[in-house]
């Protein structure tokens, strides 16, 4: 390692940045997209269209969290396999 980060650290930081960006942008887009769908296609009245859009945004947040956990488990098992091969 010459003054920079090693491959594992770069991968972890890139994943953290990527999922942070997803956590910031996708739920907002899901909320407004869900509101548009609730208004246009399902013709929900004003209190219910916001409620449906909020539920959709929460669902998207949960999907992002699950995807991050799966990525972390795969990354951890990959590193443990590499350590086992070195020994």
Image: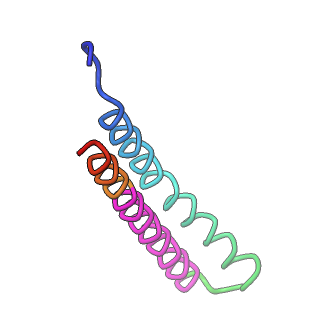
Query: Quick check: is 53 in the magenta stretch?
Result: yes
Find out whether residue 9 is within the magenta segment. no
Residue placed most toward the observer, 40 or 75: 75
Report x, y in % for residue 57: 49, 70
Q: Position of residue 82 (x, y in %)?
A: 33, 46
Nearest the camera: 1 or 23? 1
Q: Residue at x 66, y 79 (%)?
A: 38
Q: Which residues are magenta?
A: 47-74
Relative vertical location of residue 80 with respect to residue 36 in this rendering, above or below: above
- Image height of 10 relative to 26, above or below: above
Q: How many marks?
A: 0
In-front residue for pair 4/86: 86
Q: Residue furthest right?
A: 41
Pick out the residue farthest to the front: 87
Q: Give the residue displayed 72% in from the left and 85% down from the top.
A: 42
43 lies left or right of 1? right
Instruction: Kindly give the residue lying farthest to the top in the view shown.
Output: 2
Assign the N terminus to one quadrant of the image.
Answer: top left
**Dividing the image into 4 quarters, which one contains the C terminus?**
top left
Percent position of residue 22, x then y: 47, 52
Q: Magenta region's main secondary structure?
A: helix
Q: How was this image coloured?
A: rainbow
Residue placed at 34% from the left, 62% from the top? 73
Question: Residue 36's image quarter?
Answer: bottom right
Left or right for 72, reference 46: left
Q: Is residue 3 left or right of residue 33?
A: left
Percent position of residue 39, x then y: 69, 77
Q: Residue at x 52, y 83 (%)?
A: 47
């Amino acid at each position: 390692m010459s003054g920079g980060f090693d491959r594992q650290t770069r991968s972890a930081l890139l994943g953290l940045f990527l999922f942070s960006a997803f956590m910031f942008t996708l739920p907002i887009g899901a909320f407004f997209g869900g509101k548009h769908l609730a208004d246009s296609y399902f013709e929900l009245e004003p209190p219910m269209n916001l409620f449906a859009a909020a539920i959709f945004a929460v669902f998207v947040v949960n999907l992002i969290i699950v995807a991050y956990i799966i990525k972390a488990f795969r990354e951890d098992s990959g590193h443990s396999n590499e350590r086992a091969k070195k020994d």
